[in-house]
Amino acid sequence: PRANTIETLVRTLVHHPQLTMARGSLLVERGGYPLLQWLVDGMEWASWHFHAPGLSLLAGSAYFGGGNAAWRTEALQELGFDPNMLTEDIDISIRALSLGHRMQFVPWAQVGELCPPTLAAFYRQRLRWAMGWEQVTFKRLTTLFSSNAITEAKKWRTSILLLARYSAMINGLIAMYNLIMNLGHDLGWLGFGGQIAPPIRVASTINLYASLCALTFIILSLGLFREPWWRWVHVVMFFPFGTFYLLATTVLVFISWIRLSCLQELTWVPTARQAGAETHSIK
């Protein structure tokens, strides 16, 4: 971690007694193939410094993901971790929020970690995460809405944490459809002229302007956080791949539905962080 990361997270809890957890940002700064590491680092930076804090404004709370967080001991003892969940961090987040706990992002409290060493390890990591989010959604959404500890409005806002990724998936599909149609029209592949249906055209236009706004604010955030030049390069490098990543995430979600329906027992081992290490697997 950075020199003041732990102190920053603990001070956040001390200064805000209403908080149960303070969560910093987790960046992928070394290891793995250079290009993969650069792209994943740019993606994770944008996620923890822009997308996740923005999502927390809509949902009314942050969530625990991966690591780099400070928890109140009594809350962890009360909640515990469920060993049957593939993403126990997301699971404990939803259970905590269902009971009225509050969490906050502190993105300037940064730590770095190793990138998965291969594309296969990266794929298995993201598949487990996709399966874990779906598993939590299937098991905890009902628990959330049956809670007596929070208001109805809070239940709906918290559900955004579990459902927002479907909106992102739809945006990715729309962007990909628009790209294919325009490319087919330009290259003369589409005999009917490549006309895009008006609803899709409107959605594509909205998606385009939203993406441009997101890129603008992400670049402003890079300056606000005084990131080094190479971080700027990583973030800008990832942005053209964003649509393809959303499409890949959509595929992972469909795979997750199939595997969660078919597998009786879900087990996993930690994602490999160096070549030759035991790779992550879902049995």
Image (tube, helix red, strand yellow):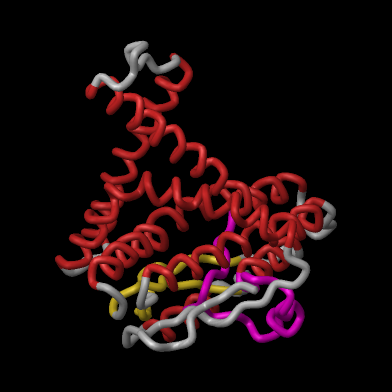
Q: Does the stretch in magenta take in 95?
A: no
Q: Is residue 110 visible?
A: no
Q: Relative to 260, is 214 above or below? A: above
Q: Is residue 62 visible?
A: yes
* Residue 96 percent across, percent down from the top left: 70, 68
Q: Residue at x 25, y 59 (%)?
A: 222
Dominant SS of magenta comes to: loop
- Residue most toward the left? 229
Q: Write the start and end of the magenta stretch as one range.
A: 60-89
* Residue 34 percent across, percent down from the top left: 23, 72
Left or right: where 91 falls relative to 129: right
Q: Relative to 134, is 187 above or below? A: above
The quadrant of the picture occupied by the N terminus is bottom left
Q: Relative to 126, is 183 above or below? A: above
Residue 30 found in image quarter: bottom left
* Residue 243 percent across, percent down from the top left: 37, 44
Left or right: where 157 falls relative to 108: right
How many callouts does the rendering have?
A: 0
* Residue 31 percent across, percent down from the top left: 30, 80
Q: Which residue is drawn at 44% across and 14% down?
A: 198
Work out whether residue 199 or residue 275 is closer to the camera in this orientation and state it.
Answer: 275
- Residue most toward the top? 192
Q: Residue at x 63, y 53 (%)?
A: 162
The quadrant of the picture occupied by the C terminus is bottom right
Q: Which residue is drawn at 73% across and 65% down?
A: 263
Left or right: where 156 falls relative to 122: right
